[in-house]
Amino acid sequence: MEQVRSLSQLVDEARKLCAEKGKKRISVAMAEDAGLISAIEEARKLGLVEATLVGNLDKMRACIQEAGANEDDYNLIEENNEAKCGIKAVTEVSSKRADIYMKGQLHTDNFLRGMLNKEVGLRSGKVISHCYFHHVPGYDRVIFVSDGAFNMYPDIKQKADIVQNTVNFARSLGVECPKVAVLCAVEMVNPDMPCTMDACALVQMNQRGQIKNCIVDGPLALDNAIDEEAARIKHINSPVAGHADVIIAPQIEVGNALSKSISFFAKGSETAGLIIGAAAPVVLTSRADSPRAKLLSIAGAVMLSHHQG
């Protein structure tokens, strides 16, 4: 598959893949928002998904009508209790009646309780993480940032799983051998800065085959990771420096601030996000996200679902 280099191209590649291999079914917990339905309806019309909507029937029908969609195109499941919406929606996925679990208007804690439910959830036996993915004008590739929304202060083992999760997702978008930059404030290993020691360990784990299908380097500061000239000036000789596809944040505040800085400061950029590493792709969007951002997240989930088989 051709490498996805923009989020507009992502939608096109998802359409091609679904035309070849079939649509995916998305199960939406508390689908009671017209903007959300608009994004799902666009994804449906593009041939990416069919949808199961879980929630209050009257509210969902009103939102479908407001979005200009047709109720007959959706599978509606009634559930008026918010906490139970997540359980019902995720059960559709864990029982293989759907492929993707998506958050609607329910609170994030109830959504995640569904995902992590021991009986019907999507636990995979490994670390589950979040990935923002961005296209910034002037860059010839999609930039993946993990973890800025789920794991707060990961240890070295968790970071290794976060790297592998993100690499697997990047590969689903056609990045054959992702270049992974382990982000720190400096590019030199410093025992007084634990994140630089973690970076060094992740590089060694990659070289020994414990982290696969990618090239990991670090510690790297942000400028060295994404700007070839900055790396040259600092005499950093690395296949990753200046060319990173994946940026691994040392902790949640860094990943969150970096991704939101891209969204708000980089005019013309586009951002989407997924939870990855679970037994199926999980779309965790903000209720404030635009329909376009939700569509892009759905497209990413479709690509990952096809890649996972």
Image (tube, rainbow, N blue to C red):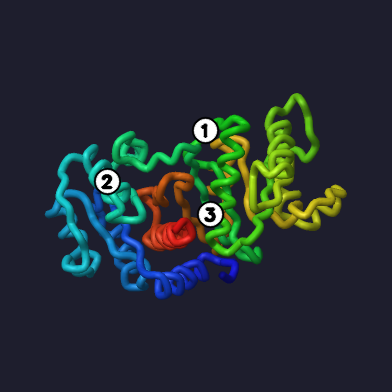
Residue 185, can we see it?
no
Quadrant where the N terminus sits is bottom right
The amino acid beneath tag 3 is Phe
Residue 38: x %, y % from top left: 30, 64
- Between 269 and 17, the residue placed more toward the observer is 17
How far apart, in angstroms, are the residues tagged by discs 2 and 1? 27 Å
Which of label 3 and label 1 is nearer to you? Answer: 3
The answer to whether residue 265 is left or right of residue 303 is right
How far apart, in angstroms, are the residues tagged by discs 3 and 1? 20 Å
Which of the two labelled residues, at mark 2 and mark 3, occupies the earlier sequence position?
2
Which residue is label 1 attached to? Answer: 152
Residue 151, can we see it?
yes
Mark 2 residue crowding within 10 angstroms, few (<14) / some (14–19) / many (20+): many
Mark 3 residue crowding within 10 angstroms, few (<14) / some (14–19) / many (20+): many
Give me the residue at 23% from left, 45% from top.
Answer: 88
Count numbered badges in the picture.
3
User: Which element is circle 2 on?
Assistant: helix
Which of the two labelled residues, at mark 2 and mark 1, occupies the earlier sequence position?
2
Which residue is label 2 attached to? Answer: 91
The answer to whether residue 291 is left or right of residue 203 is left
Quadrant where the C terminus sits is bottom left
User: Which element is circle 1 on?
Assistant: loop
The amino acid beneath tag 2 is Thr
Give me the residue at 83% from left, 48% from top.
Answer: 236
Residue 78: x %, y % from top left: 15, 50
The amino acid beneath tag 1 is Met
Residue 205: x %, y % from top left: 69, 39
Give me the residue at 84% from left, 51% from top.
Answer: 237
Which of the two labelled residues, at mark 3 and mark 1, occupies the earlier sequence position?
1
Which residue is label 3 attached to? Answer: 169
Residue 32: x %, y % from top left: 23, 52
